[in-house]
Image (tube, helix red, strand yellow):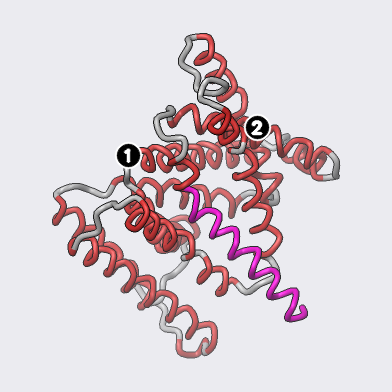
Amino acid sequence: MSSSKHSKAAWYVGLSYAFWGFFPIYWKALDGISSLQLICHRIVWSFLLLVPMIARSQEFNVMWQAMQSPRVVIIYTVAAVAIATNWLIFVWAVGVNQIVQISLGYFINPLLSVVLGMIVFHERLRRLQWVSVALAAAGVVYLTVALDSLPWIALSLAASFGTYGLMKKLAPLGPVQGLAFETGILFIPAAVYLVVEELAGRAAFMHAGPLRNMLMLGAGPITTLPLLMFAAGVRRIPLSLVGMLQYINPTLQISIGVMLYKEPFTRIQLVGFGLVWSALALFAIEGYVTRRWPQLAVTDVS
């Protein structure tokens, strides 16, 4: 691949993570509207946007064939529930001023994914990977004890997104087809809920002013656009680069939470996050060294 194509692909992936990093600002603009309604709008408008995109190509036939397999349907149903849970917690947490804890969830997520790989796929961790996981766990335990409260928002976001990633690893469809399948599974319940809310006089859509109505409609494009950019770039650049670029997302989130919305970030948070950041730095360095000099890798023998 030419260097220009490599650079373009890296930009696509980096911009997709930047989009996700700025999501708290988008959802903050819809503060006061039911989180469940917002997630239902995200599902409905995403599905309606994705259907014509895949209907004009052979992707629909591939997706239809996949739907005939009970195993595939189960995989995508679990993925759909996991991502809907992730979206709901995310939007709710933005509304209650917990953006810093959201960022912690996405800093933890890569390490949790490694643990899930060990449990589900029996992948063996190298010794320094174990140290990284232990450091991250120590950070979470420290925050729990020091704040006398489990950072459940962060852990729930990491667990739901980790489960989603696990299902996507098992799933046969591409990113766009997969999202169409997932939102399709959720479409009818989401649409019915929005209709019920409208009939009960509790709906926000078309009753929240022009700007907020447009933002709710825009929930579909802002979901699919970064996904399309990510899909366009991720296969063209090394996985190590993808791994480094993914930290754009939580770094932007914590910056937005602290600097824009003035969420507290005390010495306690600094120590807890510092342990997690140290774990990630060790994990990244160990991964780079192992890829560059495989003979130096030390696998856990337990």
Q: Nearer the viewer, mark 1 or mark 2?
A: 1
The CA span between labels 1 and 2 is 29 Å
Residue 85 image position (x, y, % from top left): 45, 38
Q: Relative to 36, is 275 on the left or the right?
A: left
Q: Could you say which is closer to the camera, residue 174 or residue 26?
A: 26
* Secondary element at image label 1: loop
Residue at the image position 58 percent from the left and 42 percent from the top: 75
Residue 21 is a magenta residue: yes
Quarter of the figure with residue 14: bottom right
Residue at the image position 69 percent from the left and 47 percent from the top: 176
Residue 284 image position (x, y, % from top left): 44, 76
| Amino acid type shown at disc 1 | Val
**From which residue to which does the magenta span run?**
1-23
Q: Residues within 10 Å of mark 1 (few under 14, many from 20)?
A: few
Q: Is residue 9 above or below residue 265?
A: below
Residue at the image position 29 percent from the left and 46 percent from the top: 152
| Amino acid type shown at disc 2 | Gly
Of mark 1 and mark 2, the one earlier in the sequence is: 1
Q: Could you say which is closer to the camera, residue 178 or residue 48?
A: 48
Q: Quadrant of the N terminus?
A: bottom right
**Residue under numbered circle 1:** 96
The number of discs equals 2
Residue 189 is a magenta residue: no
Q: Residues within 10 Å of mark 2 (few under 14, many from 20)?
A: many
**Residue under numbered circle 2:** 184
- As drawn, the residue found furthest toward the front would be 210
Q: Is residue 93 visible from the viewing direction of this image? A: yes
Q: Is residue 267 above or below residue 174?
A: below
